[in-house]
Amino acid sequence: MIRENKKFSKGQRLIAAYIAENYDKVAFMTAGKLGKAVGVSESTVVRFAAELGYDGYPGMRKALQEMIRNRLTSVQRIEVAKDMLDDNNIIQSVFHADIEKLQNTVEEIDRAKFDQAVDAILQARTVYIVGMRSSAALASLMGFYLNLLLDNVRLVHDTSVNEVYEQIFRIGKEDVFIGISYPRYSSRTIKAMEFAKSTGASVIGLTDGEHSPFVGVADINLFAKSDMVSFLDSLVAPMSLINALIVSVGIRCRGKLSDTFKRLERIWSEYEVYEKLER
């Protein structure tokens, strides 16, 4: 990303050298913190980013983040988080980061592709949902609610590699495969997606951006911003995206939605699925 440039000042050359050695930390530093670490002013850092062709320091930092996000080990994430989080107010730091991801997601979501995904789900013979590792929780949520709305949903369980293919080997061109993965991307999910694609099935990817390995494989990609918070992934925005998909499918099934839940309420009551609270 950073190349030697004769126009660099002495301070800018120091910044370039520091980034080359510490790019994983710099990707999550403010301009002020980077300047302090290098021993130059914040304005020098900002001019350095502009010299590289970025629209300010945030643009350069975002490019670095996208470059390294899937490469960081859990130990490296913990080290990076020390500079990202305020130890004295973890709640505020985490909540503010999640709010930012939600805001960015809703501003950038492709509404046309979202509608295409809903259409594909409703028209499918069978809907297969695959999410592994931390994304297994997202897949489970989506599978649970879509199964209440539709009678053709199959949640593929994250067990062994062979069993995954055994669960989807009947998939074909009348079906829809929904793959869910965020950094660090699950190689097994990507391979299952490639298999589904090879059968002619329609493939929907729920992931974080254009740099995702889903791009070029999935027919429709829906992006929700994800980020790391220390050793774990922030999946608040992806969950909201899935909520929106479920609600959209439900609204499109409005004719039978009420009947479905009236029947479910009777079953839940008869078999005491939910605790009855005294008033």
Image (cartoon, rainbow, N blue to C red):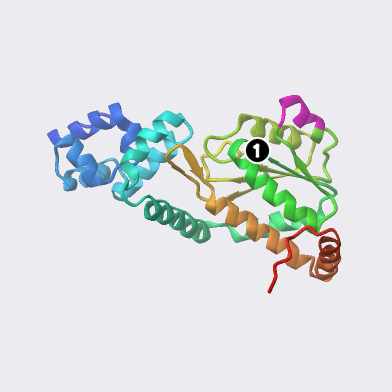
Q: Which residues are magenta?
A: 159-166
The image quadrant that residue 160 belongs to is top right
Depth check: give the residue in front, 94 or 66. Answer: 94
The image quadrant that residue 23 belongs to is top left
Predominant secondary structure in magenta? helix
Residue holding disc 1: 217
Q: Quadrant of the C terminus?
A: bottom right
| Residue 116 falls inside the magenta stretch | no
The image shows residue 38 at horizontal and vertical percentages of: 18, 35
Q: Residues within 10 Å of mark 1 (few under 14, many from 20)?
A: some
- Residue drawn at (70%, 34%), measured in percent from left and top? 158
The amino acid beneath tag 1 is Val
Residue 8 appears in view: no
The image shows residue 163 at horizontal and vertical percentages of: 77, 28
| Residue 162 falls inside the magenta stretch | yes
- Residue drawn at (35%, 33%), measured in percent from left and top? 79
